[in-house]
Amino acid sequence: MTNAFRTMIIEAVVAPLARTIAAALSPAGVGMFVSGLVPAAGPADAEPTHYVSTGMIDAQFAPLLQDGAALHAAAVAAGVDCTLEACQDLVARAYVSELPPFEAFADLELQLHQPADDMLVEA
Amino acid sequence: MILGGMFGASQLEAQVRRLFAGGVPGFQLDLIHASNLYQDAARTTLVAANGDPIGSPTDLSGNDNHPTQGTSTSRPTFLGYASHDGADDYLVAPVIDFSSTSKITIVAAVKTASAAQQMVAELGNVASSSNAGAVGLQFASTTRYRTNLRYSGGGLDQYDFARSVSPSVLSATYDFASTVSDSKLTLREDGVAIAASSKSESSPVATTGANNAVQIGRRATSTLYLNGGLAGLTMIGRELLASELALIERYNNFLKTGLPA
């Protein structure tokens, strides 16, 4: 297996489908896209508008988030019930790069989500 | 300051392992030697070179509480230590039953350059008022550490401590049985006790440690990802003599040498 580094950021609206497909394609895809992102200009505890997964993935999966038809074919082959249009929509709402995560966040003017309940006490 | 060099690494490792004798709950991680690290969560392929993912470090305590990370993108990267990207990297130690004790200690050889709040380790979910026995150790800012513990009934103790050096060996102790402020939560940085700079306390309610998984490098709520390096992590569920705590600190001080300056 050859690995490839990718930073993959998706809009929150397509996160459920992205998680389902990632989990179906590989056990190593279970748990992807759970780190929330919010606009950098706003509060960190806002509702996430995007989700990110960043790190090493099996190289054979690297092109899938950039090709709706290929993603659909792979998803259906893995047993996911989804339409071509839904996969094309996911790809259109995805940002995939080889940049380190925080450079990618800056490109998209995003920051990591931080719920308010994590700010329990301030000195 | 921590005295080092008296014992070899393997001897220190064995001495720390003995502290877990008799079924003491916890784990002991050396994240600087590739021979202790597997690339995959199934623990089939050893880490061989810098840049390899860390899917499962070996628990050296004898408890076989090997942490894992099944999600490929969320595995820390081996760079002579476990490098966490601050975005989605973390490990999870399996559910460990700390309910037989009211005393827990976490010792970490860790470094971060990030100003963001970020977790070193968390037993259970401290943010949940229903998770009695949960404890956490985190960086609260560039100048503060934070520790917290959750009592039965939902009460929370949370202390902040001034932060100075990096990388550091941090030793956090949690005593659910104590009713004395400043002894319920303590923190040492490189073997030196630090006075809390701010405290939020509730009345202690008899509580033992939680019977939960341990998040390493993030909060259980999928937030506060560690952005930095972790070279060693020991978590142990019993009262420690001062000399025993110093021993664990010496061990982690050796591991700290794997972190960049």
Image (tube, rainbow, N blue to C red):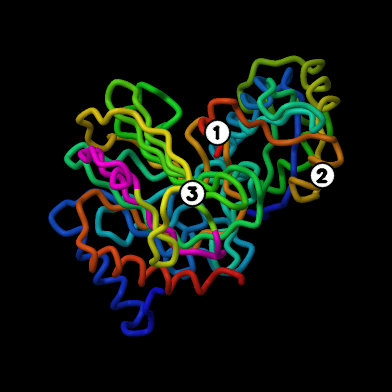
Location of the C terminus of chain B (image quadrant): bottom right
Q: Which amino acid, mark 2?
A: Ser
Relative depth, front residue between A99 and B257: B257
Decide: is B57 above or below B127: below
Name the amino acid type tagged 3. Answer: Val
From the top left corner, tell me how far across and down residue B162 is, in percent. 51, 53
Q: Are marks 1 and 2 on the same chain?
A: no
Q: Residue furthest bottom?
A: B6
Residue assigned mark 3: B120
Position of B241 with respect to B158 (left or right) is: left
Label 3 secondary element: strand
Give the residue pinned by disc 1.
B222
Q: Examine the image and state in which quarter residue B28 appears.
A: bottom left
Tell me if residue A30 can be seen: no
Task: Name which quarter of the figure residue B225 lies in.
Answer: top right
Q: Which residue is drawn at 50% across and 49% down?
A: B145
At x 58%, y 37%, the residue is A26
Point out residue B122 in the picture as x, y percentages from the top left corner. 42, 41
Nearer to us of marks 1 and 2 is 1
Q: What is the magenta range?
A: B164-185
The residue carrying mark 2 is A97
Q: Residues within 10 Å of mark 3 (few under 14, many from 20)?
A: many
Disc 3 to disc 1: CB gap under 8 Å: no
